C-alpha cells in the first residue's frame, strides 16, 4: 500500500484496515479529526460550528516532527479541561492505536505519542454513598421522558459503562432478542424494563444515535446532569445521585 501524503487519507486507511465495528469506526473518526485540529495548533470548533467545519488539511509527515509532540501534549491538557479526563483519555487511546498502525505500515518513523500519558481520573463525587435496591427501583419509577427512562433502565439492567450505552446506534440493537449486535466486544443484554421501553424509543428509526438531542447524540455530561437533578428528591441527602452510582447498584442487584 502506497504511503498517503495527507493525514485525512491516512485516517481513512487506518479505519478501513483496522478491525472495527461500524459504531467504533465512527467514534474513531471523530477522535482522529479532533486531533487534526490539535496538530494544526488550532482548537476544535464547538457546538454547531464543529458539525459543519472542515478539518484542516495536514501532511501525515507532520506527526514525525517535534512540533507534533508539543502540540499533542498541549491539546491533551486542553481537551481534558473541556470534556474531562475520561473523554480525553479515550481520544488519546484512539490516536495511539492509529499511530501504531501507521508505524507498522512504515508511514511514520517516530512515535509522537510516546511521551503522552493518560490523565488521572478522579472518582465521582459522593462515590461512597450506596443506592439500595429499593431506592434504585424508586428511580426507575420516576416520571421522566422516554429517553431518560430507557437510558436509566439500560444502565441498571446491563451494568455496562454509561459511555458505551450512549455510543450505541439504533442499528446496533437486536430489539426482539433484547441484546446488541456489536461484534468487537461481548453483546449487551437487558431485562424486561428496557425491553418494554426500547421499542417505543426507536419506533420509525432505522439508524443514527440511540439517545439523541436536538443537536445530535446525548452527551455523558448532559445525561449525568439530568440524572442528578431528577434523583435529588429520591436521595435522602437531597444531593441527587450519579449515573455511576446507579450503575454500581445495578451490578450489585445482578450479582445477587
Image (spheres, rainbow, N blue to C red):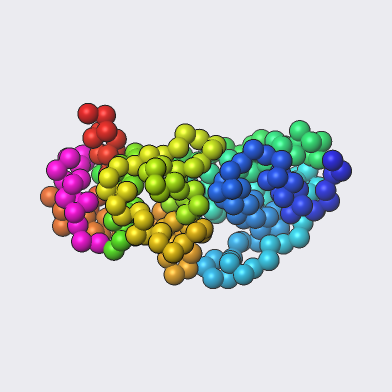
Q: Residue furthest top?
A: 256
Q: Is residue 67 left or right of residue 50?
A: right
Residue 109 seen by the camera: no
Q: Give percent across and percent down for residue 143.
A: 20, 61
Point out the image quarter for the C terminus. top left
Q: Residue at x 44, y 56 (%)?
A: 210
Point out the image quarter for the N terminus. top right
Q: Give percent across and percent down for residue 158.
A: 35, 40
Q: Is residue 252 above or below residue 170?
A: above
Q: Is residue 141 magenta?
A: yes
Q: 254 or 36: which is nearer to us? A: 254
Q: Residue at x 59, y 52 (%)?
A: 26
Q: 170 or 158: which is nearer to us? A: 170
Q: Give percent across and percent down for residue 46.
A: 54, 66
Q: Is residue 212 above or below residue 64?
A: below
Q: Which residues are magenta?
A: 128-144
Q: Residue furthest right?
A: 2
Residue 241 seen by the camera: yes
Q: Give percent across and percent down for residue 74.
A: 61, 50
Counting the numbered discs, the total is 0
Q: Is residue 245 magenta?
A: no
Q: Is residue 88 above or below residue 188?
A: below
Q: Is residue 207 left or right of residue 244?
A: right
Q: Is residue 153 left or right of residue 81?
A: left
Q: Residue at x 20, y 45 (%)?
A: 136
Amino acid at each position: 500500500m502506497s504511503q498517503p501524503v495527507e493525514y485525512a487519507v491516512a485516517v481513512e486507511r487506518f479505519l478501513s484496515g483496522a478491525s472495527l465495528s461500524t459504531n467504533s469506526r465512527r467514534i474513531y473518526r471523530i477522535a482522529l479529526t479532533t486531533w487534526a485540529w490539535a496538530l494544526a495548533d488550532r482548537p476544535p470548533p464547538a457546538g454547531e460550528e464543529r458539525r459543519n467545519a472542515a478539518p484542516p488539511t495536514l501532511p501525515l509527515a507532520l506527526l514525525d516532527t517535534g512540533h507534533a509532540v508539543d502540540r499533542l501534549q498541549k491539546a491533551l491538557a486542553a481537551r481534558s479541561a473541556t470534556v474531562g479526563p475520561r473523554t480525553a483519555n479515550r481520544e488519546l487511546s484512539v490516536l495511539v492505536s492509529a499511530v501504531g498502525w501507521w508505524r507498522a505500515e512504515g508511514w511514520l518513523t517516530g512515535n509522537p505519542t510516546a511521551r503522552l500519558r493518560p490523565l488521572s481520573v478522579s472518582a465521582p463525587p459522593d462515590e461512597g454513598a450506596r443506592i439500595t435496591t429499593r431506592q434504585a427501583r424508586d428511580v426507575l419509577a420516576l416520571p421522566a421522558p422516554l429517553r431518560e427512562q430507557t437510558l436509566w433502565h439500560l444502565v441498571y439492567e446491563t451494568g455496562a459503562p454509561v459511555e458505551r450505552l450512549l455510543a450505541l446506534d439504533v442499528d446496533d440493537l437486536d430489539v426482539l432478542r433484547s441484546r446488541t449486535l456489536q461484534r468487537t466486544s461481548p453483546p449487551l443484554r437487558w431485562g424486561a424494563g428496557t425491553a418494554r421501553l426500547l421499542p417505543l424509543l426507536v419506533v420509525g428509526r432505522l439508524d443514527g444515535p440511540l439517545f439523541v438531542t436536538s443537536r445530535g447524540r446525548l452527551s455523558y455530561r448532559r445525561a449525568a446532569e439530568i440524572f442528578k437533578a431528577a434523583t435529588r428528591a429520591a436521595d435522602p441527602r437531597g444531593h441527587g445521585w450519579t449515573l455511576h452510582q446507579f450503575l454500581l447498584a445495578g451490578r450489585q442487584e445482578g450479582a445477587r
